[in-house]
Each structure stands twice: as C-alpha cells, then as structure tokens.
Amino acid sequence: MLGLLLRVLPFWVREPLFIVIGSVFGLRLMYLAARDSDGVAGAIGAAFLVFTAIRVHTVVRALRAHRNQGQGSASAAGGTVTDTAAPATALDQAQAPTADPIAASAPAGSHAGAGTGPRPGPDKPEKDHNAWGQAVAALAVFGALAAAVWLGDRVMPVNANAPQPASCSDTEHEKLPKAYERTPRAVTGDDLCKALNRPDLARLLGTPEEVASSASGSSGTAPLTDGKVAEPDAQIDFDTYSVKLSATYDKMSTAQYVRLIDIAGDRIENDVRTLKVLGRPAVFSSDHTMKLEINLGGDQKGTPVQQGPLARTLSVALDRKDLGGYYDITVWSQTGALPNDGALVDIAEKVLPTIPERGVH
C-alpha cells in the first residue's frame, strides 16, 4: 500500500518525502549506533543516509532542468516580439501615398485593420506547476511526521502493558539512627537509591533491554560498630544483575582497607586491584554472597546459611585526600556471571557525582 502511494505521488511531493524519511531515520540510527556501540544499526543508518544523498542529487538535477526550461521559454518569447515588429514597418509604408488606384480606393479602416491586427502566433504554453510550493508543503507535512517519529517515546502514550521501572520507596521521613546525628555529613539510603536508580543503569551493566524490578534504600549502621558508624545503602535488582551502593563513614582509608585484605588473606585468585576513579583512590575486590535458606517445616534439613554466588565490588574513597570512609558498588547475579570491571567504573563515574553533598539533606 505504501509503495503504491509513493508511486502515484507527484515528483515534487514524493522526492522531499524520501529525503525527510531517509535523513530522519538515518540520523536516528547513527545516533543509536554511537550511543550503544551497535555496528548493525550504524550500517543501516549509513544506508539510509546514502539513499537520502541520492534523492537530494535527483532533486537538484530536476531543479536545474526546471530553471533552464524557464530561461528557454523567456528567450522564445523575446523572439516572437521581434518578429511582430517587422509587419508594423510594412504597415507604415502601406499607409504612405501611392499611385495604385486600387489601394487608394480601399477603405482606410479595412486596410489599417488588416495591418495592425495581432499576428497569429504559437499557442501559449500551459502554466507550469509550482515546484517550489509543492516541495515546501511536502517538507512541512512530512517534517511534522518525522518529528513525531524522532520524539515518539516522549509524545506517544506509554504502553500500559509494558513493564515500568521500579521506583525508590520514600523513606526520607523515617527516624535516622543516632550515628547519623554524630555524622551530619552522611547521606541517607534514600539519597543513594535516587542516585543509583538511573535510566541508563541497565545499559551500563551491558543489559540495555532490562528494566529495574525492585529499588530500595535503607539508612543503617555498619556491623560490629555498636551502631556508631553510619552505613546507608541502596539496591537495584534486574533480571540479570543486582547492584548495591553503600557508603561507610568510618576513619579507614582505602590504603588501610587494601592492607587489611592482604592481612586477612581474602584474595580470590589475585582479584584485588587498585586504581583511580574520579581522581580518588579505589580498589577492586571479590567475595561470595551469603545464601539464606528458611525451612518452614518438613523433614528436609540443611544449612540455614550457605555460600552464594561471587560478587564483585569497587570501593572508592569518599574524597581525593582519602581521609577515611568509602563508597562500595557491588554487582552479582544468581547465575554467578559478572560484568567486566569497566562496567563498575562506568557506574561509579556516573553515579557518585550525583550523590548529594555530604551534609545536605
């Protein structure tokens, strides 16, 4: 149906339509290819742009031919005027006194009428269609359609059946532990949840098609500190990965944390790696999660706490001077699969700058 419609449209409507559609889809696909590093989308977008360039060349040639035709018609009209001037001169000579008795006896009116009457000329050319007007109208109409396609996600209603990303539960008005009063610069679990629950978090993890199934934050304290060290955290769950962001407001620097790992012997296949993130000291480490098993009855007996899948953690100092305290970004999955370390660095560089300034609530 669309192909038939395009074939019956006039040239000055069809070609601008091709140009608009090709340029919009081509640029959109190239943008998505650059954003998602998708080679297939880039190739398709390039094909659209090449097609558009061919159509633009066709329109330019047609406009040049139309202009040359108009100049030729003007030249032909000038030649006709020149030809009609010659009989006028002959008419002046005919009106002069003559010895011809026949010419003298002829009525002056009839002779003048024969000489001054319009000379039969070629038929007037048909009025040419307004090519520029059709082109502008086509661009205006289909430009609006192209804008609707480009901004479809914003202007079109959201599909009610499509899964919606989870939002953070509002815990801002809950009473905070006393450790937060002693550390007025500490953020809350709600602050961390809002910073971590980004629209592009799934893409940073390498699973751009997934949406968050749950999002939560809590304002707790660090274990084994008798409730004296504030440690808020937030967790976002996807089908593939789970991500946890926590902040620990103690006096341990990142360098001291690395030495503690060395002393404890918790290295897993030399997985500890130091680096700089946002100009701050940082360290990668790995550890196993804990798997809890709750028996609600029956004859089955098992260990209530078991070793769960491996988790990868990036710890980043709270400030560049590394005076104490750190953020932890931890990723794990039920299958044991983990994204590469670059994904955690990308998350840290996107999320940590958006966390509210310590002391601002």
Image: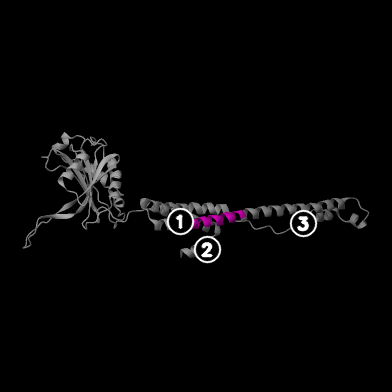
Residue 48 in percent (x, y) is at: 46, 57
Quadrant hosting residue 149: bottom left
Of the two numbered discs 1 and 2 in the rendering, the one whose residue sits closer to the viewer = 1
> Label 2 neighbourhood size at 10 Å, few (<14), some (14-19), many (20+)?
few
Determine the secondary structure under disc 2: helix
Q: What amino acid is at disc 2?
A: Val
Numbered badge on residue 119: 3
Circles 1 and 2, Cβ within 8 Å, touching? The answer is no
Residue 37 position (above or below residue 223):
below
Q: Is 200 inside the magenta-drawn segment?
A: no
Of the two numbered discs 2 and 3 in the rendering, the one whose residue sits closer to the viewer = 2
Q: Can residue 148 be spotted in the picture?
A: no
Quadrant hosting residue 183: top left
Magenta part of the chain: 44-64
Relative horizontal placement of residue 61, taking residue 49 as reference (left or right)? right
> Label 3 neighbourhood size at 10 Å, few (<14), some (14-19), many (20+)?
few
Q: What amino acid is at disc 1?
A: Ala
Q: Which numbered disc, 1 or 3, marks the residue that appears first in the sequence? A: 1
Relative depth, front residue between 33 and 100 = 33
Residue 263 in percent (x, y) is at: 16, 44
Location of mark 2 (residue): 8
The dominant secondary structure in magenta is: helix
Numbered badge on residue 252: none
Q: Distance between the residues labelled 1 and 3?
A: 60 Å
Q: Which numbered disc, 2 or 3, marks the residue that appears first in the sequence? A: 2
Location of mark 1 (residue): 46
Relative horizontal placement of residue 305, taking residue 157 as reference (left or right)? left
Q: Residue at x 90, y 54 (%)?
A: 104
